[in-house]
Image (tube, grey):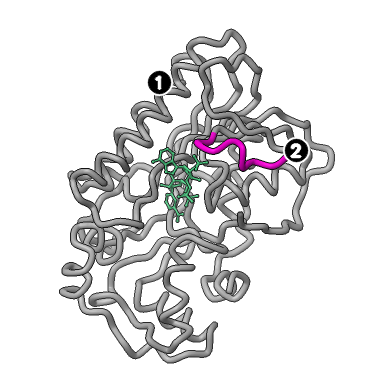
Amino acid sequence: MAIICFQVSYPGAKKMNILITGGTGFIGSALCSRLVEDQHHLVVVSRHPERIKPPVQGIDSLANLDMVFDAVINLAGEPIVNKRWTDQQKQRILSSRLDTTQALIDYFARIETKPHVFISGSAIGYYGTGRTNDPIDETGAGDDSFSSQICRQWEAIALKAEPMGIRTCLLRTGVVLGNGGALAKMLTPFKLGAGGRMGSGTQWMSWIHIRDLIGIILYCIEHDGIQGPVNGTAPGPVTNQQFTKALGRVLNRPTIFPMPAAAIKLLMGQMGEELLLAGKKILPRKIQDAGYAFLFEDLEEALADVV
Ligand SMILES: NC(=O)c1ccc[n+]([C@@H]2O[C@H](COP(=O)([O-])OP(=O)(O)OC[C@H]3O[C@@H](n4cnc5c(N)ncnc54)[C@H](OP(=O)(O)O)[C@@H]3O)[C@@H](O)[C@H]2O)c1
């Protein structure tokens, strides 16, 4: 479990009952640490509730749950990058998200007192893989890529909470920089001086520091005016080449070994094409318009903080 200390807290804030799926993951465990620090009561739905330590309460199913929650946060899902996208793995990636989200919707339909807010995970993969340098905000469209299809189906189920009177936010998360996730996978080659750009390096990387992602989740909980899609990315997206150079500078290592696109396609197939060789310039328009102030707008500062 990633342990992250946060400086910002809201001592006067109301203590809430919060239900979380995926609370044991990279983002979820950091989120839980922050929420526990703020003295909220947390219930985490997990396939391994016995591994969850008090004061967080672990449960393995929503079936008999009749507690009242102020907020529900949905982050569960089979990891997207761990295995090659065979048909079977694609099905696991998809059904793990759709089934968990549908189970939450069924739970909402069953209980009398509904939560005030539902924050459901999604990703900037929603916006698809087509090449463009145009900035994209929450009004951007999807396409037929697998990443976009997952996000659109995942969001469509989450949105069934809205007619039940539950304010619903769809958190379209970018590349999260923290103690785990994509950065942890990149660090070893970069530390060994074997890092370099991927493919042409011109593809966009819309990143976010994990503290800002958690800040955005808290901001969505606290601000009744926010609903619908919310991009979870920093305001300064960079190209893969710029990201590579910044990481090399922070680690004080050369970045002279590019990974050719053909090698990425051969080794990782469609997953490499969609997640590493494609990328869009995503802007966090909605959360900034709502007044959220980012802790990390500059990539190099964010990387230095994390590594
Ligand atoms: N990290 C990123 O950069 C990033 C970027 C964009 C979007 N996201 C999305 O944000 C969410 C959280 O990301 P994360 O990086 O924290 O994910 P993670 O570390 O992989 O954790 C996700 C959690 O989902 C549960 N899970 C895993 N496989 C599952 C399966 N087959 N069926 C049901 N539950 C399963 C696990 O909880 P239990 O073992 O306790 O059941 C796990 O702790 C994910 O849905 C991810 O797609 C993440």
Residue 39 higher or lower than 145, as above or below: above
Name the mark nearer the viewer: 2 or 1. 2
Residue at 44% in and 23% down? 103
- Under circle 1, the secondary element is helix
Q: Is residue 71 magenta?
A: no
Q: Which mark is residue 160?
A: 1
- Under circle 2, the secondary element is loop
Residue 226 visible in the displayed image: no
As rendered, which of 304 and 189 lies closer to the eye? 189
Specify few, some or many for label 2: CA neighbours under 10 Å numbering under 14, 14-19, or 20 or more: few
Q: Amino acid at mark 1?
A: Lys
Q: Which mark is residue 298?
A: none
Residue at 83% in and 42% down? 11
Residue 36, x across and y down, in percent: 73, 42
Quadrant of residue 199 within the rendered picture = bottom left
Residue 161, x across and y down, in percent: 46, 21
Residue 305, x across and y down, in percent: 62, 71
Residue at 47% in and 55% down? 233
Which quadrant: the C terminus? bottom right
Residue 106 visible in the displayed image: yes
Question: What segment carries the magenta color?
Answer: 46-54
Residue designated by label 2:
55
Q: CA distance from mark 2 to mark 1?
A: 31 Å
Q: In this rendering, would 53 be left or right of 270?
A: right
